[in-house]
Structure formats: structure tokens, C-alpha cells
Image: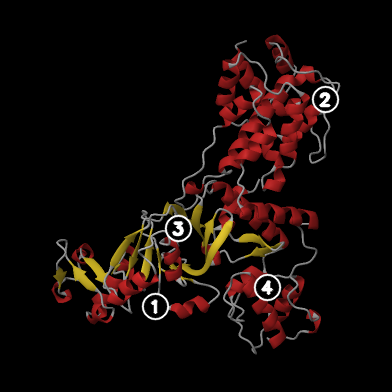
Amino acid sequence: MNRPLLYIWLICSLFTACKEEEAGKKIVENHEQPEILELAEADEIEDYLESLEDSTQTSIYELPGIIKFYKDRGYEPVWTSLELRNDLYQQIENIEFEGLFYEDYHGEKIHGLLKNTSLKESNSPLEILLTSAFLRLSNDLGTGKLDPTKIYDIWGTPTNTVEPFELLNKIAEGQSSPGEILDSIKPDHVVYLGLKKALRQYREAGIKENSTTTIPSGKMIRPGEKDERIELVAHRLSELGYFKNNPDSVSNRYTKDIQTALESFQLDHGLQVDGLVGNTTIENLNLTTEDRYHQLLVNLERWRWYPRDLGDQYIIINIPNYELHLVKGKDTLRYHKTMVGTEARKTPVFSDKVEYIIYNPTWTIPPTILKNDIIPGTRNDLGYLQRKNIRVYNRNGNQVDPQEVNWHSSEARSYTFRQPAGPSNPLGLVKIIYPNKYMIYLHDTPSKKLFENNARAQSSGCVRVQDVLDLARDLLSDQKKYDDKKIGEILKSGRTTEIPVTKDVKVHHFYWTAYQKKDTTKFIDDIYDLDKKLWELLKP
């Protein structure tokens, strides 16, 4: 029998050959097993296959590559020693603490084979399963189990890459152990490590709730109003530790003590702290401990998608938490509140590098806003452009009289629309540019009172930053000529001024809805509803 074909047959029948065992137990491999110096002879494998009455297809990761790998090395095994086999199995056994699933890596089958007292008779199934498990672990820990670019339209961060067979060769050549290799390709960012800690805490405390209350959606309930759902709200807030009174004594009136508890819940979950019982707040209240556990899993998966090297100095924006941090090394230099895109005009997830800063910026209307807002507004009222202080330019850069444009034809979209610098300009006094295909940047805003809101998904996609002039100052701090006095003169002049940034600073727009803060797990509102879709794809 030809060996590649033999291996295909063997692999297809592995699961019927291996005794089902209970997973999750700490295993010490039988020390009576010999070192495995060669795979079973072809005729032994053939006899083994012929002894099977049934054959069940099982999922072997990278099957064609595995066949080529063993052919290239003359069918010599990799997992020859007790130490190597136990090391890899320990990684599989503990993989759920990384937010992945034991069963995806042949956990039960490998567990059963490792307990086999006559391993020589079944060394080939164990060898192939260990190799398949290692390759998939390398991929899933290094790049993520799923490809975000196939799931989300707003994902522009390049995916990580690993070469699982190159990593496998390091083990085969004795250069490194499975544990060392897998640890080296995991994310090591503080948020990822915090999520792992939170996951362990949830697993140890128990994922299932003994009793949960579900609140029906419906019309908004305001303080002082009566609604039969108020009793359920009080019970749910009590279950979550926010309402300290006896919920059984609550009537159907929305009282001050319930409002205080609800506002604390809203604050902790990134919701608008308004004390109103709306459907977004109800949806968050209804999430169970198991739902929150799943939320940890999807956020761990996202962090496996993000770049491992964020740069020595970088700006990181957590979109749903409306926060921006300027980080150097492991130190946070600055923190700023942000506003991000609405559900209809989402801020995308991507990474790029800061190139320049513009003071007294003009605003060139982007295509989406032009199509959805400016042109329809002008069709209804020619005075719209004048009130917004927006000027129209043709392809030659010459200003056009709006009265000469046919606003009901496609011609209208061929013009450039620009608002000059000034107090009414929505970009405020400064914008920070990191050129990207989404035309997204950081900028100031004249609507500074909106930063007082807790929920701030209010922009058209770009990121508005509170006190952004201070952030810009830090980005130019290595250029002494642009001190506070010089920047003050530029701002006072009203002239649009572009200054290159010479520091190497990356910008990362990321999205995570759970994190650890002072040993407490914080969950925030999934403003773009990305978590549920990801969990449906991720779950085993």
C-alpha cells in the first residue's frame, strides 16, 4: 500500500480506533511506554485498518500538509518522547483558559491514547493527532480561530500570520518545546491578560446562574412612572448586586432607590446614565452570567486578531468604551474621552501611522455625508449651504454658485464641498491625520458638551477627541519650534497650517467590550452588536 494513501485511510479511521475517555483530568502518561523511534510499519497499519468494522471521517487539520510533512521526513515521528507528548497535551488540557475549546484539538482522543499501555500498537494514530492538534493550536493562538475580514465590513487591521509547519519543525529538530512555542505566539497585551484572568474567575465561580429574571422590552419607563416591569427590573438589579433593598417589597412604581441602582448599572456598562429604562438598558440587564462568559470568549478571540507589535509609542482607541490612550512602552501618557461613529456610520477597526497635524482645518465633506445629508438638504432648501457655511468647488478648484447647480441630477455629486476654518467648523481647531482608505482621523469639535454624555456614538465615523490640542502638543513635543507660543500664534491667525509629525506613533482603532480593572471585570455596551454574531461563529 502506498504510504500517503495509507495515511489518508488511517486518519479517516482514527476516532473509531481510540477509546472514548473523559477529558479535563490531569493525566500522567504511562511510564511503561517506550520511546517512539519510528512509525508503525506499513503492513501493521494495514492490518490495523482491516481490523476495523466501521470507518468514521474525523477532522484532521491541514491533512494534505501533514501527509507531505511526513513524506518529506521519511515518515519519522516527531512526538518521540514522553516529555514532548505530555507537554503538548498539557497545552490542550488548559486551552479553555485561553478562551478556546478542548474538543477542537482532539483532547479526548489524545487523552485516551496517552493512557494506553501498549502504545506501540497505536503509535501512528497518536502521532497524527498530536501533529494535527499542534498545527491548529499554532494557528488559533497566533492568528485567531476565525478570520475577521470575512465577518465584518468595518475590519481593516491586517491579520497576523504564523507558519505552523515551521514551528513544528522546531520541535522535530529539538530547538524548542511545544509550550515555549505556543506561549511565544499568544498576545501579551495587558487587556488580553486581564481577559484571561477574568475568564478563570468566571470558570471557578461557575458560569450558570441559579435564578435569573428576564425583563420584556417595551416602551421607555421614566422615573416616577408605573409599569408592571418595574418589579422585574428591581429583581434583576438585585441579582446583579446593584439593588440592595428587598426586591419582593417593590411595587410597579419606578422609585428613586431603583433609579439610583439602575444608574450605577448604566455607568458600569457604558450606557447613557439617564435613569431611563429603555430597550438598550433592558437588553444589557437581561444578559446572564453565561452570556458574559461568552462575551469574554469573543473578546479574547478579537485580541488574537490584533497586531502583536503595537509600536513603542501608540494611540489606542477602544471604540465602544469611547476612550483613547496614548501609550509609550507600558506606560499610559495620556487619556482622553472620545466620540465615535453611530450604528449607521460605524468607526472602523484598523491600524495606521500618524503623519501630520492640521491646525485651523477646513472640512472637505466626505462622500457618505455628502450623499446622505448635504445634497438632500440642499435640494430641499438652497439656503442650507449658506447656513452651514459650506462652499462648492468644481474639478478645477473654482468656487461655484449653488444656484447654478442642478441638485436633482448626478452632477451635484461631482463637486467638492468644503467648509472653511472657523468656530462653526465641525473639526474644531485641529485634526490629526493618519492616511487610510476609510478617510478617518482624530479631530476637535465645537460641541464639547457632548463629552459629558456617557454613551457617545454620535459622529459620522471619525473620532472626536476631548482636549485634542493637548494630544497634538505631545505628538509635536520633539520639535522645539512648535512650542505653545508658536501653536498659539497659528491658531490665532486662523490660517490652515499643516505640520508633519516626526515621531513614530501608530494609531490603533480596536473594539473590545470586556476588560479587567483593579481585579474587577467590566462589561460595556456592544454598541455595534458585534459580539453576538462572533459568538455564533466561534462556539463549538
Mark nearer the N terminus (1 vs 3) = 3
Q: Amino acid at mark 3?
A: Pro
Badge 3 is on which residue? 348
Position in image of residue 335 (x %, y %): 54, 66
- The reply to whether discs 1 and 3 touch (Cβ–Cβ < 8 Å) is no
Q: Name the residue nearer the viewer: 140 or 447.
A: 447
Q: Residues within 10 Å of mark 2 (few under 14, many from 20)?
A: some
> Splitting the image into 4 quarters, where does residue 262 fall?
bottom right
Position in image of residue 362 (x %, y %): 29, 69
Mark nearer the N terminus (2 vs 4) = 2
> Splitting the image into 4 quarters, where does residue 445 fall?
bottom left
Q: Amino acid at mark 1?
A: Pro
Badge 1 is on which residue? 446
Identify which residue is drawn at 70% across, 63% down.
518
Q: Residue 116, labelled with which disc?
A: 2
Badge 4 is on which residue? 215
- The reply to whether discs 2 and 4 touch (Cβ–Cβ < 8 Å) is no
Q: Quadrant of the C terminus?
A: top right
Real-space CA distance between mark 2 and mark 4, rounded to the nearest whole angstrom: 52 Å
- The reply to whether discs 3 and 4 touch (Cβ–Cβ < 8 Å) is no
- The reply to whether discs 1 and 4 touch (Cβ–Cβ < 8 Å) is no
Q: Is residue 80 visible?
A: yes
Which residue extends farthest bottom?
A: 224
Position in image of residue 230 (x %, y %): 69, 81
Mark 1 against mark 4, which lies toward the viewer?
1
Vertical relation: 301 (above or below) 91: below
